[in-house]
């Protein structure tokens, strides 16, 4: 199985949040993860980055922030040139979807947890 380096945007140390659960499941499935959130900390010893790195190399970005909180990230997300961006429930953003389409990046409205559980990630 191809391991997909994944950027989790909206990562948090709160174990009741879907971003935390998704990060854990991605790690359990052996996908390399980069965690990005507004507050630092870590998930299973992996640091949550609070400063954007324009040199991250990722296959997939999975979003766990609402469209209003995506505004400062739109150009940055596109500039990383991921293969796809997963819009988890509540993160759907027509502006970002259009930007991705214009740049040949797949926009997938799905749930990372469901994709992982069905082995369709």
Image (cartoon, rainbow, N blue to C red):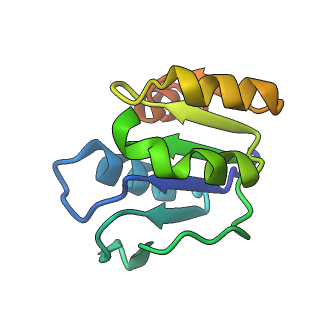
Q: Is residue 87 visible?
A: yes
| Residue ID at (29%, 43%) | 18
Which of 82/44 is in front? 82
Q: Is residue 119 visible?
A: no
Q: Quadrant of the N terminus?
A: top right
Determine whether, in the image, residue 20 is placed left or right of residue 94. Answer: left
| x and y, in percent, of residue 60 in the image | 65, 45
Of the 4 image quadrants, the one containing the C terminus is top right
Which of the 4 quarters of the picture holds residue 76?
Answer: bottom right
Q: Position of residue 38 (x, y in %)?
A: 33, 65
Relative to 44, residue 110 above or below: above
Residue at screen point 62% across, 72% down: 53
Residue closest to the eye, 56 or 20: 56
Question: In the current view of this chain or complex, which residue is farthest to the right?
Answer: 104
User: Residue at image x 32%, y 76%?
Assistant: 40
Residue at 58 percent across and 44 percent down: it is 74
> Percent from the top left, x then y, of residue 88?
42, 30
Query: Residue 117, how many percent across, how many down?
Result: 45, 31
Q: Image check: 6 left or right of 64?
A: right
């Amino acid at each position: 199985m191809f391991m997909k380096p994944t950027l989790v945007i909206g990562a948090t140390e709160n174990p009741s949040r879907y971003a935390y659960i998704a990060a854990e499941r991605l790690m359990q499935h052996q996908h390399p993860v980069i965690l990005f959130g507004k507050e630092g900390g870590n998930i299973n010893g992996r640091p949550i980055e609070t400063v954007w790195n324009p040199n991250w190399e990722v296959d997939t970005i999975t979003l766990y922030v609402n469209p209003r909180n995506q505004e400062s990230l739109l150009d940055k997300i596109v500039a990383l040139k991921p293969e796809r961006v997963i819009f988890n429930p509540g993160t759907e953003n027509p502006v970002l979807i259009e930007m991705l389409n214009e740049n040949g990046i797949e926009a997938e409205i799905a749930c990372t947890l469901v994709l992982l559980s069905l082995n369709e990630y």
